[in-house]
Amino acid sequence: MVSYVSLLCIFLSVGVIVYSVSLYYSSGLSVLPENELNFIEFSWTFIPTVLVGVLCSLNLSFIYLDSELESEDVVKVM
């Protein structure tokens, strides 16, 4: 489970870096315009990304470790 989340984070990070570099070299312009606030842009990108990562890991741990709820005939759909 940890390796899945780690590989997913690495894959997405590398994808974003490659895309940013290709944008920079293809247009010759900076990816970030001068009039944008870097902290706000970073915040509303980073915070949802962290929250999605946490929810994915919780979902995977729930599937991996089984539900602790008492029920009969539990069917897992993945």
Image (tube, rainbow, N blue to C red):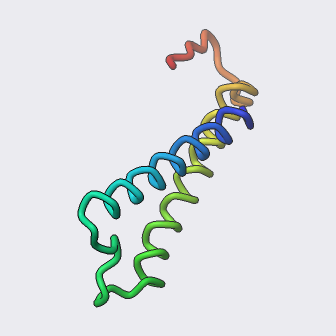
Front-most of residues 53 and 69: 53
Q: Is residue 3 above or below residue 54?
A: above
46 vs 7, left or right, is left
The residue furthest top is: 73
Q: Is residue 62 above or below residue 76?
A: below
Residue 60: x and y, percent?
64, 33
Answer with the quarter of the image where residue 8 lies.
Answer: top right
Total marks shown come to 0
Residue 21: x and y, percent?
41, 58
- The N terminus, quarter of image: top right
Residue 63: x and y, percent?
65, 27
Residue 65: x and y, percent?
75, 27
Q: Is residue 9 above or below residue 75?
A: below
Residue occupying the point 51% across, 19% down: 78
Q: Is residue 54 above or below residue 28?
A: above
Residue occupying the point 48% across, 55% down: 17
Front-most of residues 14 and 57: 14
The residue furthest left is: 27
Answer with the quarter of the image where residue 10 lies.
Answer: top right
Residue occupying the point 45% across, 53% down: 16
